[in-house]
């Protein structure tokens, strides 16, 4: 039931996730934040089994922050995504693998470019210009494919995300009442209203 979205623009990444925490048919919480700020220019969105997601996301967040403290510079979004993929691949070979799907978005301050990475629970990773995880991908990837432009502005990306959310309200049987969105650009991470 969880939905994650990512859209890259000219010099930013827009990331959004639903705020619903549910188990089977029971809604536990409707203000859940399914994101972790890995460093000032990289954000991780996650979905999956409730215990695994929080545990794995916090492990990745703390590991990336520790790297920054030890080495005096932050990991790029690409390096953070590759580190996350490697840790997920290692967990697959253990007795208790993590069941976590993720989107990692960020702004590389050295090259001045936005990056978005799609990762699934089998440690597959792909760099994309737009992405969706969860049931929402069935409804929204076609909209993103049609309306996404490589040089999108922030208002255009927010408008595209709103189109996706409207499509979910019309076609998806489950009500997802609220979404939390963040933009990552050269100035860092900030939350935006939808």
Image: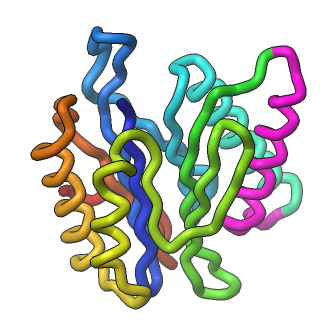
- Magenta highlight on residue 75: yes
Residue 174 occupies quadrant: top left
Q: Is residue 173 above or below residue 140?
A: above
Residue 145 occupies quadrant: bottom left
Query: Which residue is more in the foreground, 174 or 21?
Result: 174
x, y percent for residue 116: 56, 66
Q: Residue furthest left?
A: 170
Task: Give the residues drawn in magenta, as a range.
Answer: 72-95
Query: Which residue is more in the foreground, 99 or 11?
Result: 99
On the question of residue 12 being in view, the answer is yes
Q: Is residue 46 above or below residue 25?
A: below
- State the residue at coordinates (20%, 52%): 165
Q: What is the quadrant of the N terminus in the image?
A: top left
Residue 10 occupies quadrant: bottom left
Secondary structure character of the magenta stretch overall: helix
- State the residue at coordinates (46%, 60%): 131
- State the residue at coordinates (50%, 35%): 47
- Mark count: 0
- Magenta highlight on residue 34: no
Q: What is the quadrant of the C terminus in the image?
A: bottom left
Query: Which residue is more in the foreground, 117 or 140?
Result: 140
Is 179 positioned to the left or the right of 189 in the image? left
The colour scheme applied to this rendered structure is: rainbow
On the question of residue 65 being in view, the answer is no
x, y percent for residue 173: 18, 31
x, y percent for residue 159: 19, 70
x, y percent for residue 99: 64, 27
- State the residue at coordinates (63%, 68%): 127
């Amino acid at each position: 039931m969880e939905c994650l979205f990512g859209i890259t623009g000219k010099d930013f990444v827009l990331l959004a996730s639903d705020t619903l925490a549910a188990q089977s048919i029971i809604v536990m919480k409707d203000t859940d934040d399914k994101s972790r700020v890995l460093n000032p220019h990289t954000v991780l969105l996650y979905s999956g089994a409730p215990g695994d997601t929080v545990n794995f996301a916090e492990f990745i967040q703390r590991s990336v922050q520790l790297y920054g403290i030890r080495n005096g510079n932050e990991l790029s979004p690409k390096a953070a995504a590759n580190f996350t993929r490697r840790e997920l691949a290692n967990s697959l070979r253990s007795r208790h693998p993590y069941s976590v799907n993720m989107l990692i978005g960020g702004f590389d301050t050295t090259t001045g470019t936005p990056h978005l990475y799609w990762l699934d629970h089998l440690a597959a990773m792909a760099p994309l210009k737009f992405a969706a995880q969860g049931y929402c991908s069935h409804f929204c990837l076609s909209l993103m494919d049609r309306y996404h432009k490589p040089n999108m502005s922030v208002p255009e990306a927010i408008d595209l995300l709103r189109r996706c959310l409207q499509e979910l309200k019309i076609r998806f049987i489950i009500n997802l009442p609220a979404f939390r969105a963040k933009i990552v650009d050269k100035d860092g991470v900030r939350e935006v209203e939808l």
